[in-house]
Amino acid sequence: MTAVTTATALKRVEIKPRYGNFIAGQFRPPVREQYFSNPSPVTGSQLCEIPRSTAEDVELALDAAHAAAPGWGKTSATERANLLNKVADRLEANLEKLATLETLDNGKPIRESTAADLPLAVDHFRYFAGAIRAQAALAAGDVASAVRWAEAQPAPVEQELLSGGWPGALVVAVAYDYEHVRIAPAQVWLAAGEHDRALAALDVQARVADAFHLGWLRTKVLALRALAYAGSGDPDAALRCLEAALDLAAPEGHVRLFAAEGAPMAGLLTRVRQRRAGVADAYLDDLIQACAPAHPDAGPLSGRELDVLRLIAAGCDNPEIGRRLFVAPSTVKTHVNRIFGKLGVVSRTQAVARARELELL
């Protein structure tokens, strides 16, 4: 920035002389009332003072987070998605001011803040909102809606991440994005029966996990690979991946990582338990219970699901089943996934075998 543009920029934004820690919905001074100066590399003068936080401040933030967790946990996917979209809207509405602050704070060119950093932040919040809706659609059995979301997503940024061309802080932010939300497309392809597409997506994400030492993501990739291999007819590879995931997850006590995948995951975990018969494994037993596969007697197949199951047993693919039943292939996929969930299986072969055991065929 030149002296003229800097003066103009400073008039455009309002910067308070001192800020606190934002905890429980308000700015609070640090417990020890210590601050440090935040100089601007653009002007060389102090922009403001920032809290020099200590363990006491961290504890206050944790207390606030724990207090908010029960209420937040009860919010619906729609509410969460709407809130994230509202954040994106506010960022977009104040893009010029926020880009100016970004440049004054770290010295990068204003064109980069305006054309890259802030739009990327907006895109991330909108992506999070869409991913939440897609995962909720999967939970409700609406695979078609989730697939439409996945198909509409822009090209991922994995290759740019792995190339090493991104600033460190941005790498951390995007890596966190991958670890907690960008796994959603792989889940969509699994639910849609597109196992090759799921495996391809997971291969790239495994590279991200290894490059940035993201343990949760590495474990989740292995767990989802297990489902993909099981669905594509390779049970040995599926069990190898799942046992590797369990070895990584057990010391951390991860539960939701597996439980979120429901009945198909429970079926695979049960197979691992059978391989470890005679060996005490409370963690594995807890995971199987957490996945809570519906017992067939508790959730009988509907008449339409039985029609689909008979056609699966006859060797028909989804388009052929759709033609015979006069429904769309996306509707067939929904029925197939519900059948898998009720029978506690992850593939058509397993579904037919289990149905014959239960004398449904």
Image (cartoon, rainbow, N blue to C red):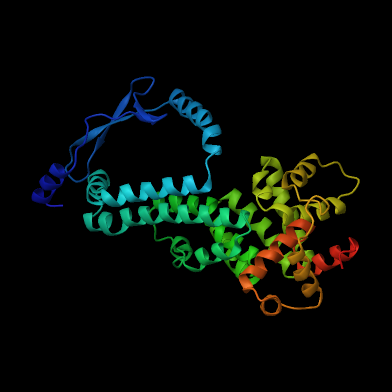
Quarter of the figure that contains the C terminus: bottom right
Where is residue 93? Give x, y as percent.
Answer: 27, 50
The answer to whether residue 204 of the structure is visible from this angle is: no
- Pick the front one: 280 or 106: 280
The answer to whether residue 19 is above or below residue 194 is above
The answer to whether residue 268 is above or below residue 36 is below
Q: How many marks?
A: 0
Where is residue 322? Give x, y as percent.
Answer: 67, 76
Which residue is depicted at the point 48% across and 45% down? 80
- Pick the front one: 358 or 162: 358
Which residue is depicted at the point 70% across and 75% down? 325
Which image quadrant for residue 73? Answer: top right
Using residue 11 as the reference point, say whether residue 57 is left or right of it: right
Where is residue 94? Give x, y as percent.
Answer: 26, 48
Which residue is depicted at the point 22% across and 51% down? 96
- Pick the front one: 38 or 58: 58
Using residue 95 as the reference point, say whether residue 202 is left or right of it: right
Using residue 281 as the reference point, say whether residue 320 is left or right of it: left
Using residue 280 as the reference point, say whether residue 5 is left or right of it: left
The answer to whether residue 167 is above or below residue 41 is below
Where is residue 238? Give x, y as percent.
Answer: 75, 62
Residue at the outermost left position: 4
The answer to whether residue 102 of the structure is visible from this angle is: yes
Which residue is depicted at the point 43% across and 60% down? 164
